[in-house]
Image (cartoon, rainbow, N blue to C red):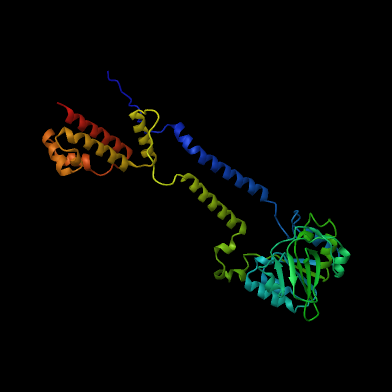
Amino acid sequence: MTTEVTLPSTSASPTARQVWTRARGIVLALVLLIAAAVAIAVVRSDARHGELDPRSADPYGSRAVAELLADRGVDTRVVTTLDEAAAAASPDTTLLVAVPDLLTRTQQTRLHSATADSGGRTVLVSSGSASVERLAPGVIADPATSLDSALSPDCDLPAARRAGTADTGGIRYTTTHLTADECYPSERLATLLRIPAPSGNGDTVLLGAPDILLNDRLDEHGNASLALQLLGSRPHLVWYLPSLADASAASEEGERDFFDLLPSGWLWGTLQLFIAAALAALWRARRLGPLVPEKLPVAIRASETVEGRARLYRKANARDRAAAALRSTTRTRLAPLVGVPTAQAHAPEALLPALSARLQGDGQSLHALLFGPPPGDDAALISLADRLDALEREVRRP
């Protein structure tokens, strides 16, 4: 009857507990990152659904103002392409551009050319510095938005005076047009600007914030009155929602790179992650300069040192360094046993002939064992250690 003997695992083999201890920090960070991403996606999934869309009844939609305009005989039509918006410009039409900054430079120039002499009204909602220079020449958008939401008109524009206080606080504008109506100032800069056309017919209205058009803000202050007066001065309202799928935007694809399509928040987030990674790397590499040997206050068993070093080699997957250390130590111990000076223990031409004469063995096999290439896997490394140990016992045998 034979008994099968189970060999104990080597000291370099990590246990499941050790693996979990090493990886739990990374796993916890990934779990927190995924949970945060899911939470943000859930919170924001419907937060801006249908924003400034006159067909949307969501809080950030604009269906309520479209319904009120319809009761007053103003029909609202939604367009999503530049060609439709430019073709709709006429004296009896109000053209509202929901997000002017989404338009490319060429689109902005084309739209301004179509509306400048149309005799109708053009309403630009939250037009920033990326679009205001071409859609309303002579107007500059202040990069600092207004901190106050509800503002007083403080101008002679009849629509603003009748509406009174309204939620126009947002982007602020300055202009060189002497005949412009500058209303709802915030820190002396207007958040609603009306520029008459040079021909005397038609005008351009810049609205610093979309709040007066949103469903959940329409019934506050004078928002409804101001919105109906600005959008109901003509019998037709064309509501332009710019889209990246517009063919006129695709024709300029060569002028916009990948980073132009990314929201600014992603770029800032990436920069913050890069800075955090750099700080983490600096923290982990805080020990600068060479290592300084230090006498330990207690004696450490050689076996513990060997096990610790083996774990480090295993963690770094450094089989070549481990094999080199095993072979070098073996050669250092074998050299005095076969009459070779320790200084020549690592010279094959001095050590191998002496070993072959002592063991009467094959010199090539000894060369492969003591000076051969590094093992390819952990099993080969363990086999190498066993063979080196067996060789040393053979040499020491009387």
- Can you see residue 83? no
Query: Where's residue 185, x and y in %?
Result: 80, 65
Q: Residue at x 58, y 42 (%)?
A: 32
Q: Name which quarter of the figure residue 209 lies in.
A: bottom right
Q: Above or below — where is 303 with respect to 231? A: above
Q: Nearer the viewer, residue 111 or 194?
A: 194
Report x, y in % for residue 105: 63, 72
The total number of labels drawn is: 0
Quadrant including the N terminus: top left
Residue at image x 75%, y 64%? Answer: 208
Specify the quadrant that holds the C terminus.
top left
Quadrant housing residue 133: bottom right
Residue 187 seen in render: yes
Relative vertical location of residue 55 with respect to residue 317 in this rendering, above or below: below
Q: Is residue 361 left or right of residue 245?
A: left
Rendering coords of residue 70 (x, y %) = 83, 64
Camera-side residue of 245 and 361: 361
Q: Is residue 43 left or right of residue 280?
A: right
